[in-house]
Image (cartoon, grey):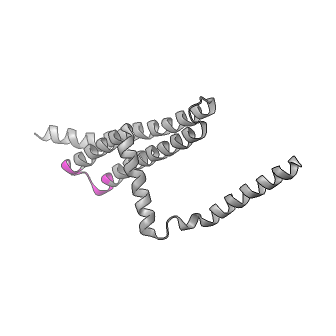
Amino acid sequence: MSKEITQSVSSESESKTKSQRELAWQVAPNLLVSFKYAWQGVRYAYASQRNFRIHVFVAIIAFSLGFILQVTTTEMAIITLTVAIVLVLELLNTAIESVVDLTVKQSYHELAKIAKDCAAGAVLIAALTACMVAGYILLPHVFQLTTVN
């Protein structure tokens, strides 16, 4: 009898999951709504993640210096790409942390720690690399400006 109940509960949950999956495409009925949801994610990260705000602030400084120092279009594109990589990784880090927190709730789990630490490490490596790229691009322009005067 308990086997029949288990099978019944199992088939009910499978049908629920299947119907939710079938309706998943209806969450964003058009492209504009999809962009709205994506922008909500960016806004959430900006409002709730200190490091995301720091990365945005540093990005503004890098872009400003690029314009002030009149770097080439190619150099500006490289700065833009490295900034984008850092911000994208910070968004992914936020998503991973949220999913891990949802899964483990208030308990500690070593695998949850590893997932969160690795995601944060990816952002750290990208941010350090972006600083190096900006340095390689911007510092020669700064030196050129100081030696001319």
Q: Is residue 99 visible?
A: yes
| Residue 48 relative to residue 97: left or right | left
The location of residue 97, given as percent across then percent down, is 51, 40
Q: Position of residue 76 (x, y in %)?
A: 30, 53
The residue closer to the viewer here, 63 or 105, is 105
**Seen from this angle, which residue lies furthest front?**
1
Please state the extent of the stretch shown in magenta in the rendering. 67-76
Left or right: residue 101 versus residue 89 is right
The part of the image, by quadrant, that contains residue 126 is top left
Location of residue 61 by image quarter: top left
Residue found at the very far bottom of the displayed protein:
30
Q: Where does the C terminus fall, quadrant-wise? A: top left
Number of labels in the image equals 0
In front: 16, or 28?
Answer: 16
* Residue drawn at x 62%, y 30% as measured from the top left: 109
Q: Nearer the viewer, residue 46 or 149?
A: 46
Q: Nearer the viewer, residue 5 or 69?
A: 5
Q: Tell me which secondary structure the magenta stretch mostly adopts.
A: helix
Residue 56, placed above or below residue 12: above
The residue under the point 40% across, 48% down is 44
Residue at the image position 49 percent from the left and 42 percent from the top: 93
Residue 116 colored magenta? Answer: no
User: Could you tell me if residue 136 is visible in this image?
Assistant: no
User: Residue 5 location in percent, x, y?
Assistant: 83, 51
